[in-house]
Amino acid sequence: MKDELSEHQLNLETQDLSDQEEDYERKKDELKSVQQFAVEVTLDPDTAHPNLILSGDGKQVHHGDVRKNLPYKPQRFHRCVNVLGKQSFSSGRFYFEVQVKGKTAWTLGVASESVDRKGQITLSPENGFWTLWLRNRDEYEAIDNPSVHLSLKNHPQVVGLFLNYEEGLVSFYDVNAADLLYSFTDCSFTEKLYPFFSPCTNDNGRNSAPLIISPVKHQLNLETQDLSDQKEDYERKKDELKSVQQFAVEVTLDPDTAHPSLILSGDGKQVHHGDVRKNLPYKPQRFHRCVNVLGKQSFSSGRFYFEVQVKGKTAWTLGVASESVDRKGQITLSPECGFWTTALSNGKEFVAVDEPTVCRLKSRPQKVGVFVDYEEGLVSFYDVNAADLLYSFTDCSFTEKLYPFFSPCTNDNGRNSAPLIICPVNSND
């Protein structure tokens, strides 16, 4: 039974590991390409808030409990526990790295020379700050307009920051994983920029670890140990996916709900968009304007899981929907309207359709797993081949039957003609 279950739950062996290593090498090369612009950065004590404690070499900073009595200086931060680098940049490209290991909160980025240093600061590009922060140990956010919540796979231990002044680009990297965390693009820089640091308050010792400006290893030696860590992380993710795959259920498409332009296979396992709108009898359960279809099966308790192949598609939407959702008008996909979905558009833009919408910068899934725990109010989406958790809707309030929800989207003159395929969970990829 265990052997059957093991085969039932994700055979992602040699090929998937090879794909992961190839992707990792690509990301390493990208990081190396910006690490070549590494510059010397040291902290400027004349800008440091009076509660901050800087090391003698200007490479470390942490928050202290005692506010020092320092002479007034116009460049010093007065209310917010910030400090700038001594070095300024008004052209070209530069890169530096900061160790954030052991911290529960921090902010890093760059700031314009003219930023407010005396009042209560609002971090935003409009106010001259391009920053990324951590709060509450695991809440990462790029402080853009609007701010972007980052659902990261790992907790960065060292953050790399790259700036291209002429291109208006500020990018943040998880150095150990070689992951691009976020990029501010099309920025308008008109004055000197300074490296910006905030270790945040020490939170009664819980956030006492320092920010440390680290020497950059240009060749990114992340060999044996990092590959070992990646494999260990991959095994952990596989186990997590197996834990939800045990709740796999039979799902088939319900032709009575299918939009007239959709073409369903005879076994109810595949759907794609056709160019001809069929003349079908009116049914209250049929989607009229949007090219959607529901599963035949409904669920009002317990846990269930199913998988859908999305390979070859440039646009799709998957998830679950409440029984009472609107099926005749122009639909707004949101939890408030009874839809818990993820979607791909334009071949590369993957989003979780939450409030607000959450973007995930990840490789494109070929097969998506959908897991629901009705009582827990949880809907989770997985990239099955990578064993990655893509997104979770949490604390959902389910009050009626839920149905699997599918949209292959329009075929886009043949560019998106591949079908959505409901797959057996024990298939070998």
Image (spheres, rainbow, N blue to C red):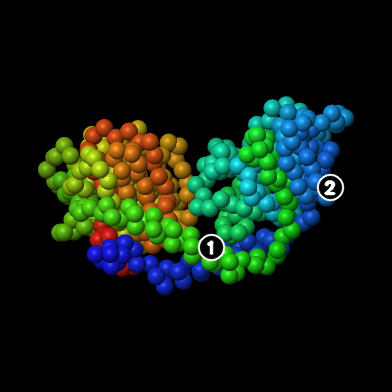
Residue 119 left/right relative to 406: right
Report crowding for label 1: few under 14, some 14 to 19, many 20 or more residues within 10 A (C-alpha). few
The residue lying at 71 percent from left, 45 percent from top is 210
The residue lying at 31 percent from left, 59 percent from top is 309
Q: Quadrant of the C terminus?
A: bottom left
Disc 2 target residue: 56
Q: What x and y, as percent, mark residue 69?
A: 84, 28
Q: CA distance from mark 1 to mark 2?
A: 34 Å
Q: What x and y, as percent, mark residue 187?
A: 65, 45
Disc 1 target residue: 229
Marks 1 and 2: CB-CB under 8 Å?
no
Rendering quarter of residue 65? top right
The residue lying at 58 percent from left, 66 percent from top is 225
Judge whether residue 368 can be spotted in this image: no
Report crowding for label 2: few under 14, some 14 to 19, many 20 or more residues within 10 A (C-alpha). few
SS at badge 2: loop
Residue 325 left/right relative to 43: left
- 381 or 276: nearer the viewer: 381
Residue furthest toward the right? 71
- 47 or 7: nearer the viewer: 7
Residue 413 left/right relative to 173: left
Residue furthest toward the top? 119
Instruction: Looking at the image, tell me whether mark 1 or mark 2 is earlier in sequence order.
Output: 2
Amino acid at the residue labelled 1? Asp
Amino acid at the residue labelled 2? Gly
- 65 or 185: nearer the viewer: 65
SS at badge 1: helix
- 366 or 290: nearer the viewer: 366
Rendering quarter of residue 385? bottom left
Q: What x and y, as percent, mark residue 269?
A: 21, 57
